[in-house]
Amino acid sequence: MRGVSPASGTGHATMETSLSQTNPTLPVLDLSRFAAGHPERATALDELRSVARSVGFFYLEGHGIPQDEIDGILSLSRRFFALPEDDKLAIEMRKSPHFRGYNRAGLEYTRGTQDWREQVDFGPSVKALRSRHRTRRGSGWSAPISSPMHCPS
C-alpha cells in the first residue's frame, strides 16, 4: 500500500506517513489483490479494514477502468457542482423516494457531526425495483435519477 496526495494525485508516502499534518496523503489500495486466490488477499483485506476505520477514504487502483473514463467522470462532476444551486436542487435527494440525488452542504451527518460537503448519490439506471427489505437510509426502492436541465448526461 502506498499514499497519494489528494491535491496532486501523485506521491509515494507509506501508510505510516499518510495524513500527517505536514504531508496529507490518502492510501492507495490495489483491487487486484482482493481477488480470490491472490497470495496477498488476506493482507489486502487487513489493509482495507485498517484504512476504512482510521482514514475513511482511499484511492483504488488495479480496477481496470480506462483513464479517459475516469477523467470524463471527474470533468462531469466538476461541471455539476459548478451549476447554480437551483439547478442542483432540481434533483434534491429529499424529493426522491429512491435515496438518490443531490444534498447541499450541511445536510449530512457523520457520527452526530454535521458534514460540510455537497454530494450526489447515484447508481446505474435501472427499472424501479421494490426490495423486500427496507433499509435505514433508503426506502427499499431502486430507480434512475433525473439530471438537472443544464447538466450534460
Image: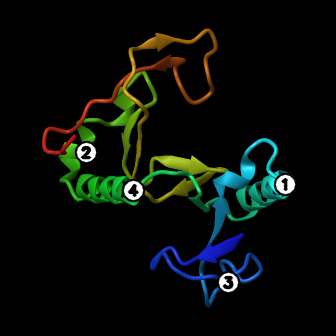
Residue assigned mark 1 = 39
**Tag 2–tag 1 contact (CB < 8 Å):** no
**Tag 3–tag 2 contact (CB < 8 Å):** no
> Which one is closest to the eye, mark 1 or mark 3?
1
Which of the two discs, 1 and 3, labels the residue nearer the N terminus? Answer: 3
Residue assigned mark 3 = 20
**Tag 3–tag 4 contact (CB < 8 Å):** no
Element type at marker 2?
Answer: helix
Q: Position of residue 23 (x, y in %)?
A: 61, 87
Amino acid under disc 4: Ile
> Which one is closest to the eye, mark 3 or mark 2?
3
The residue at 66%/82% (across/down) is 13
Residue assigned mark 2 = 88
* Mark pair 1, 3: CA separation: 31 Å
Which of the two discs, 3 and 2, labels the residue nearer the N terminus? Answer: 3
* Mark pair 3, 4: CA separation: 27 Å
> Which one is closest to the eye, mark 2 or mark 1?
1
Amino acid under disc 2: Lys
